[in-house]
Image (spheres, helix red, strand yellow):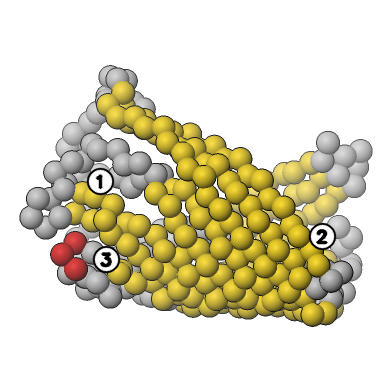
Amino acid sequence: MPERLAGLGAPVSTSPEAKSADQTLQSVAVADTLSVAKGLAQFTLGVRRQQVESNNFAVLGATTAHYDQGATTPSFALVVRPMDQLSFYANYIEALTPGATPRADAANPNQVFAPFKTKQYEVGTKLDLGSFGATLSLFRIDVPSGIVDPVSKVFSLDGQQRNRGVELYEFGEPVHGVRVLGGVTWIDAKLTRTAGNQYDGNHAVGAPSVQANLGAEWDTPFLPGVTVSGRLIYTGETYVSQDNTQHVPSWTRFDIGARKRHESLQPLLLYWQANPTGYLISRMPRTFWVSLLTDF
């Protein structure tokens, strides 16, 4: 039977507040689109220069590790539109991601790793009928990952995770003043290269196989400027260990909210909603979020 603690107890250890690390990410992109046959086909070619600067600091502020590296990555996209309401597309893009941090029990816990490239492939189609639309896409993302050698205990970026999935989304205004937006994503996230090939083929940590959401807004006719909203978010079962022996069950979250647009000298938008963070926290109570926006 679980035992309730009398209090938090005395801290085991303390350390002074200090800056441990910082990162600066910079990116410049250039793209050009070529169109033929009055927009029947469009081809976009882009290039992006990305720079990642990272520093680790000791408790007293001295820099213990530093790197400043960049990479030039390409992107391609092809869109074919046989009619105004229907289009088919395919794209490829690379991104530069800051290097992973070694685990505390690794032989090199303080090592700073250079940024690595992730690669994404996607094909899909989009239907837009004005008051209703939908998209369907298939994607694959290859991501390097950190692994610890079972013998030397050295952490490296020799691992790999492969994410393949299908995404279906719909949007529109089926009735005047009522807007809907929702979709579902099926993800097959697998570990394709692990330490000693021990967990190859297992489900990736923190990647649910199914995610779905459905949201709706209604502009109330009896209260001008007031919009009420609701949203349902579902997240499937998720593994939390590479050996797939531990997992958290699926969960569902409901949000309700409202906003009021006040037409004064400057438009004001007031709204509130539940749990805006997007994180799942054990035994989290009802949470309310209030925000005020204005146009200048």
Q: Secondary structure at mark 2?
A: strand
Between the C-alphas of marks 2 and 3, the distance is 52 Å
Say what amino acid the circle numbered 1 marks.
Pro
Which residue matches tag 1?
Answer: 102
Crowd class of label 2 (few under 14; some 14 to 19; many from 20; radius 10 Å): some
Q: In the image, 119: left or right of 192?
A: right
Residue marked by disc 3: 193
Residue 145 drawn at (x, y percent): 32, 57
Foreground label between 1 and 2: 1
Rounded to the nearest whole Å, what is the CA distance between mark 3 and mark 1? Answer: 17 Å
Give the quarter of the figure containing the N terminus: bottom left
Q: Quick one: SS at disc 1?
A: loop
Question: What's under tag 2, amino acid-wise?
Answer: Val
Choose between 79 and 259: the one closer to the eye.
79
Q: CA distance from mark 1 to mark 2?
A: 50 Å
Q: Residue at x 63, y 52 (%)?
A: 46
Closer to the observer: label 2 or label 3?
3
Q: Position of residue 131 (x, y in %)?
A: 83, 76
Residue type (three-letter) at the residue carrying disc 3 = Arg
Task: Nearest to the eye among marks 3 and 1: give it.
Answer: 3
Q: Residue at x 44, y 61 (%)?
A: 280
Q: Quadrant of residue 160?
A: bottom left
The residue positioned 42% from the left and 69% from the top of the image is 163
> For mark 2, what is the residue?
226
Other-residue count near label 3 (Cα within 10 Å), few / some / many at <14 / 14–19 / ≥20: many
